[in-house]
Image: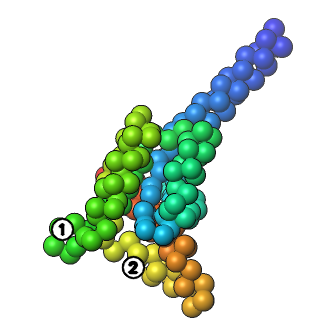
Amino acid sequence: MLVLRNSCCSNQKEELVSLKKKMPRILAIDYGQKRTGIAVTDELQIIASGLTTVATETLFSFLKDYFKKENVLKVLVGEPKQMDGSPSQSAAMISEFVLQFQKLFPDIPVIRVDERFTSKMAFQTMIDSGLTKKQRQNKALIDEISATILLQDYLTRKMI
């Protein structure tokens, strides 16, 4: 009888581990002409972490590989706006990216989120973290931190 309980418990543990692996993440994209910052949540969708920055020309290849490995519930894409709320100069380029994304990944919803001030907030985060001037010049890091800020802001608003 004791052996049955142990096997029962180990099966339940295996199922929990399997379930945890399948829990979906949320991905955030700070799309740029040259580089794209990417951030992702943990499986419980509580914490946003920077994932990487990729060359924009290789973004779809990166995403295809990532989606094969990870279960993604939705993707947030930064929506650049002017101070008055009107679209910025890069809005058309990002809208084109979103259309291509939706064609390639029709089962993954895209949510557009206001990205005003994320680059400035990312730079300030780098200063507050004690990075040197040379380290702060790393634009790829700024893009990754910007995506993380987009995602964390979304998560915070979702919890309210």
Q: Quadrant of residue 19?
A: top right
Name of the residue lying farthest toward the right: 3
User: Where does the image place residue 113, in percent across and percent down from the top left?
Assistant: 31, 57
**As drawn, 4 above or below 145:** above
Name of the residue lying farthest toward the bottom: 133
Q: Please state which of residues 62 and 79 is positioned toward the viewer in this rendering.
A: 62
* Residue under label 2: 120
**Please, what is the three-letter code of the amino acid marked with disc 2?**
Lys
User: Where does the image place residue 145, in percent across and percent down from the top left?
Assistant: 50, 69
Q: Please state which of residues 67 and 114 is positioned toward the viewer in this rendering.
A: 67
User: Where does the image place residue 56, in percent across and percent down from the top left?
Assistant: 50, 62
Residue at image location 54% in from the left, 38% down from the top: 71
**As drawn, 129 above or below 150:** below
Mark sitting on residue 85: 1
How far apart are the alpha carbons under marks 2 and 1?
17 Å
Residue at image location 79% in from the left, 11% down from the top: 4
Q: Please state which of residues 104 and 112 is positioned toward the viewer in this rendering.
A: 104
- Tell me the mark number nearer the camera, choosing from 2 and 1: 1
SS class, disc 1: loop
Q: Which quadrant: the N terminus?
A: top right
